[in-house]
Image (spheres, rainbow, N blue to C red):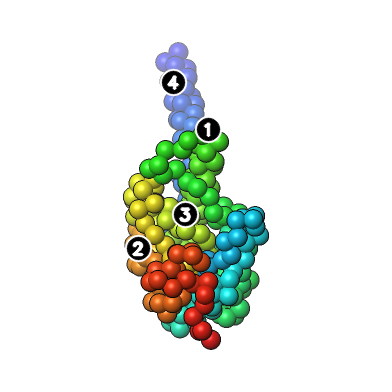
Amino acid sequence: MARLSGRVLTGAVLVAVATLVARAPLAAEPEVKPHGTRTLILIRHGAYQEDPETVETSKTLTEAGRQQARLTAARLAALPVKIDAIYTSKLIRARETAALIAETLGAPPPQDDRDLVECLPPSEDPPSTKAEVLAAEDCQRALERDFERYFRPSPERDRTEVIVAHGNVIRVLVSLAVGMDTQCWKRMTIPNCSLTVIRVAAGGAMQLVSYGDVGHLPPSLQSFTSSLPLWGKRASEGAGVK
């Protein structure tokens, strides 16, 4: 009887051990950590037609805007890095700017991203209608998707990527990168065809390297809009830059 009890006890222990092993979680595979730094160059599109009778999606670059884009491309071409990819808003003024840059650089064709389209995100100015509230919330979600998609380390090697977008889009993305309240985006300005550079290290830390840099443009081509220059002369009047 003692021997039988011992066998029963031993069998119970083995069953218990087997049950515990079965329930134990499998060892997780080692996480592959990113090894590269991602450098993002955010570029606002060039000056464009502001005819109020033209729908927003059909507004094209002015001649000044095309000159701005070509000069921006020339500056990028002079950098000691390769541009690995160009992403752009689907609006015509951004796509035209991106195409001129890609053509000059001999880079791959720009990739459209509908989440980069200009919109009006929540700000310190309260919306006046329910429709404005809903539109602002949709805009914020799109920009947060952009941030998750682009503002992350490179998985294998260092990369440099260009994003051609809009003033509101860039200001909110910068706010997210530096940990600023995104509703304060109107406190910043962003010129046409300016360069804003953000570096995302392999560990995920982000650093704002430059903001709204227009050093590659002559003063007469530095503008916020076609009708709002930085220094007095309208960008839509051109500057005689070849």
Pointer 1: what residue? Answer: 130
Lower sequence index among marks 2 and 4: 4
The reply to whether residue 106 is in sight is yes
Q: In the image, is 90 to the left or to the right of 187? A: right
**Mark 2 in CB contact with mark 3 (< 8 angstroms):** no
Q: Which of marks 3 and 4 is in front?
A: 3
| 96 to 29, vertically: above or below | below
Image point (59%, 65%), residue name: 49
Mark 4: secondary structure: helix
- Please name the amino acid that badge 4 sits on: Leu
Are there few (<14), some (14-19), or many (20+) residues within 10 Å of tag 2?
A: some
Residue 197, percent from left and from top: 40, 67
Report, in whole angstroms, how far the alpha carbon at label 3 lies from the one at label 4.
72 Å
Tell me how far mark 3 sits from mark 1, CA to CA. 21 Å
**Residue 121 point in image, percent of width and height:** 47, 46
**Residue at position x 33%, y 50% from top?**
180
> Residue 168, labelled with which disc?
3
Front: mark 2 or 4? 2
Tell me which amino acid carries mark 3: Asn
Q: Earlier in the sequence, mark 3 or mark 4?
A: 4
Image position of 175 (left or right of 133):
left
What residue is rendered at 47% in x and 67% in y? 192
* Viewer can see residue 194: no
| Disc 1 element | helix
Q: What residue type is labelled 2?
A: Leu
**Residue, disc 2:** 208
Q: Which of pointers 3 and 1 lies earlier in the amino acid sequence?
A: 1
Q: Which mark lies nearer to you, 4 or 1? A: 1
Q: Which residue has dot 4 on it?
A: 9
